[in-house]
Amino acid sequence: MDKAVVLTGYMGAGKSSVAAELGRILGAEVLDTDARIEELEGMSISSIFKQYGEAYFRDKETSLLEKLKEEGFCGILSTGGGMPLRSANREFLRDLGCVFYLKASPAAIARRLSEDDSRPLLAGAKDMAEKEKRIAAMLTEREAAYEDGADIIVDTDEAGVKECADFILRKLND
Ligand code: S3P
């Protein structure tokens, strides 16, 4: 691969699973920005948010993209759900390769994250209904950034991991 395949989208959209499947099929390196930042900082995303705050984490995301661009990263890049919010990040992602926005509805996301408590931005929701409401509000705020940063939108609501990966591979070969 001479360019990266970049996956963006909200938490629970399936970025990590689809990235792993693409990596398997293409025999390419898979890099997860959250995992890399956890490694570099030596602590979990939740602890980074707690100890240093969200702005610190966002700066780490931007520095990581800058570094990947410098290195000419050309594997599969699975990004944290807030990565496209900064316009500078959207530019870095576009420079790295083809950007696929994995889109999912609030209901699908809430279902997929029902047992998950690793996401600091959704922590403390008292039930599924409140979680879904929070997700819907954040998605409304973020949608324009996700769409603006994307080359191609992948609707994941009705599609499984394999179908999403196959759709992406078809688009890459178009
Ligand atoms: C975030 C999504 C998370 C992680 C952090 C913030 C967001 O990544 O980067 O908790 O702002 O949507 P995932 O999308 O991999 O859960």
Image (cartoon, rainbow, N blue to C red):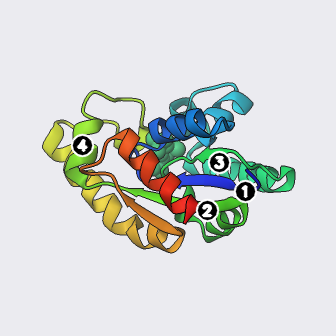
Residue 32 seen anywhere in this rendered image of the structure: yes
Q: Mark 2 belongs to which amino acid?
A: Cys
Camera-near label (3 vs 1) is 1
Q: How far apart are marks 3 and 2 (CA)?
A: 27 Å
Asked which quadrant contains residue 111, the reply is top left
- Which numbered disc, 3 or 2, marks the residue that appears first in the sequence? 3
Provide the residue designation for mark 4: 110
| Residue at (61% x, 71% y) in the render | 87
Verify CB contact (< 8 Å) between mark 3 and mark 4.
Answer: no
Q: How crowded is mark 3: few (under 14 residues within 10 Å), some or many (20 or more)?
A: few
| Residue at (39% x, 59% y) in the render | 154
- Ligand 1 is within 8 Å of the C-beta of the residue at disc 4: no
Counting every numbered tag in the picture gives 4
Camera-near label (2 vs 4) is 2
Image location (x, y in percent) of residue 104: 31, 54
Asked which quadrant contains residue 139, the reply is bottom left
- Ligand 1 is within 8 Å of the C-beta of the residue at disc 3: no
Verify CB contact (< 8 Å) between mark 2 and mark 1.
Answer: yes
Q: What label does residue 56 carry, if any?
A: 3
Verify CB contact (< 8 Å) between mark 2 and mark 4.
Answer: no
